[in-house]
Image (cartoon, rainbow, N blue to C red):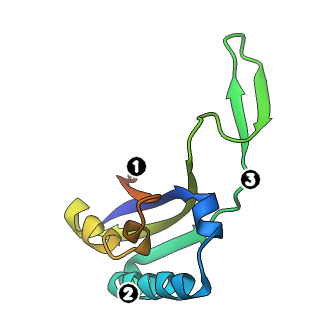
Amino acid sequence: MAKYMILIYGDAEQWAAMTEEQWQAHHAGYGAFMAKAGARLLDGQQLQPTTTSLRADAGGQVHTTDGSFLEAKEALGGYFLVEAADLDEALEMARLLPELNYTHSGLEVRPLVERG
């Protein structure tokens, strides 16, 4: 089985504006995803909205900044790490996540590089 990272992106302002009813429906969607993934769900966490970034300049000096490098409304808000037979199965699991019910959010599914 291969491992896939499901990255969750969304607009933090829109998440903050959700009602209690919307959050309950959102969490129910996670329940469906977790039931489908079962023991193949290896890890998953929500990320804090703050970001510290590191980047080296052309001279090799490392600079630290608070915030992302890109100007974007959508930010990485969390992830799941799953095992799946192939990309199609990973996508089938990801389609259950509630973020796909909102126009301000989306998912990225990426295979992990397995070494030796």
Among the 4 quarters of the image, the one containing residue 90: bottom left
Q: Nearer the viewer, residue 6 or 116?
A: 6
Among the 4 quarters of the image, the one containing residue 92: bottom left
Q: Is residue 84 left or right of residue 49?
A: left
Tag 2 or tag 1, which sits nearer the N-term? Answer: 2
**Could you say where residue 115 lies in the image, as x and y percent from the top left?**
40, 49
Tag 2 or tag 3, which sits nearer the N-term? Answer: 2
Residue at left offset 76%, top offset 25%: 62
Q: What amino acid type is highlighted by mark number 1?
A: Arg
Residue pointed to by mark 1: 115
Residue at left offset 59%, top offset 35%: 70
Residue at left offset 38%, top offset 87%: 32
Residue at left offset 46%, top offset 88%: 28
Evaluate if marks 3 and 2 touch, with contact meaning CB atoms under 8 Å apart.
no
Tag 1 or tag 3, which sits nearer the N-term? Answer: 3
Evaluate if marks 1 and 2 touch, with contact meaning CB atoms under 8 Å apart.
no
Regarding mark 1 in the picture, which secondary structure is present there? loop
Regarding mark 2 in the picture, which secondary structure is present there? helix
Q: What amino acid type is highlighted by mark number 3?
A: Thr
Res. 116 in view: no
Which quadrant of the rendered structure holds the N terminus? bottom left
Res. 74 in view: yes
Q: 51 above or below 3?
A: above
Residue 32 circle label? 2
Q: CA distance from mark 3 to mark 2?
A: 29 Å
Q: Nearer the viewer, residue 76 or 64?
A: 76
**Could you say where residue 23 lies in the image, as x and y percent from the top left?**
56, 82
Residue 62 circle label? none
Residue pointed to by mark 3: 50
Mark 1 crowd level (few <14, some 14–19, many ≥20, 10 Å Cα): few
Q: What amino acid type is highlighted by mark number 2?
A: Ala
